[in-house]
Amino acid sequence: MVAALGAAVVILFFVNVLLGSYTVTIPDFFRLLGGADIPGASFIVMENKLPRAVTGTLIGVAFGLAGTIFQTMLRNPLASPDIIGISYGASASAVAAMVVFGLTGVAVSMAAMIGALAIALLIYLVSHRSGASGGASARLILIGIGFAAIMQAVVGYLMTRTDIRTAQGALVWLNGSLNSSNWDRVAVLAASLVLLLPAVAMLSRSLRGLEMGDDAAAGLGVRVGPARLGLVVTAVLLAAVATAAAGPVAFVAFLAGPIARRLLGGAGSLVAAAGVGAVIVLAADFAAANLIPMFLTNGTALPVGVVTGALGAPFLLWLLVTTNRVGRGG
């Protein structure tokens, strides 16, 4: 199944690059990679479609890993960065950078990263100061949801205090968009993942132990406190770099882990979650940019986050309903 996911990622990657409003043949694509200059195609493919597809793949991997780490460590499918407030922290910080300080480009991305890290630290500190009983997972999630509501209110206030042009740019970013993808962002994303993926690999054994509970993990030789802190920092950084690159692409982190578990019969894996995340982003972006505009009167392409949000919202409702039924049955 992991091999099939890898094949799906490769196929969707080339679908995004070769097809759409401007199509490119496979021979021409490899000629472009080899440095050939094809009028029109050189710019559209090498400066638009290719960096967009690479960015979509990388943020899908990052969001998929971040969500699965949180969900596995806290043993709760609701514990993903876009549910517990981390993505909203990034959003509030980025919008403040645009509206209050007039920043653009890389500066907004850096502000988003700082906001994600700051809100994650606050959630972590508040949840630990409020007690260390067996309900730590549920407590952290509830505190995160509370912070998410506060950050949403901050974003709403800031959007009412700016001009229409700035608000429009901020709104596109808030919906999660790959429209501004370029090779500079690809380089930052790739460098970040080169540093973070080895950390994920080293912490994966501790994550498997924590999935069985703190006591079981300690019995297996896992140093629970340092392992949990390392996993939180790594997952937050993964979510932060992805959000900084494309905005808070809704529900990718939330969906990737549960879908990977169902595909692998309940076992799940970080590799599978990363693949599912990439598949979701690439498929949603192709639909948002090329398929859905065919059915709209003005033919406007949508931000990728609109499509992922439309996919994730029903899943969230279903999860809440089924969880409530299980709780009553217990």
Image: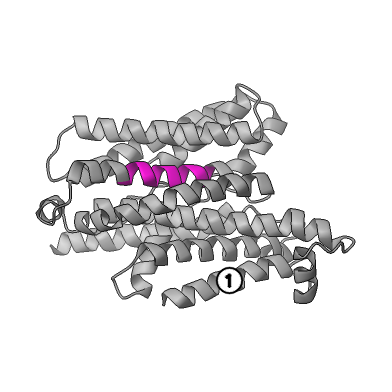
Please tell me whether residue 286 is drawn above or below residue 165 in the rendered image.
below
Residue 12 in picture, x, y percent from top left: 60, 70
Q: Is residue 318 left or right of residue 298?
A: left
On the image, which quarter does residue 233 sit in?
Answer: top left
Residue type highlighted by circle 1: Val
Quadrant of the snapshot with the C terminus: bottom left
Residue 237 in picture, x, y percent from top left: 43, 42
On the image, which quarter does residue 106 sit in?
Answer: top right
Please tell me whether residue 228 is drawn above or below residue 28 in the rendered image.
above
Please tell me whether residue 109 is drawn above or below residue 14 in the rendered image.
above
Residue at numbered disc 1: 10
The answer to whether residue 31 is magenta is no
Q: Is residue 8 left or right of residue 231?
A: right
Looking at the image, which residue is at 12% across and 41% down?
Answer: 133
Q: Nearer the viewer, residue 157 or 224?
A: 224
Looking at the image, which residue is at 18% across and 31% down?
Answer: 130
Residue at the front extreme, as displayed = 34
Residue at the right extreme, as displayed = 39
Looking at the image, which residue is at 55% across and 41% down?
Answer: 244
Please tell me whether residue 88 is drawn above or below residue 59 in the rendered image.
above
Disc count in the image?
1
Quadrant of the snapshot with the N terminus: bottom left
Residue 82 in picture, x, y percent from top left: 42, 47
Q: Is residue 38 left or right of residue 312?
A: right
Looking at the image, which residue is at 80% across and 69% down?
Answer: 31
Residue 185 in picture, x, y percent from top left: 62, 45
Secondary element at tag 1: helix
User: Can see residue 181?
Assistant: no
Q: How is the image coloured?
A: one colour
On the image, which quarter does residue 48 sit in?
Answer: bottom right
What segment carries the magenta color?
231-243
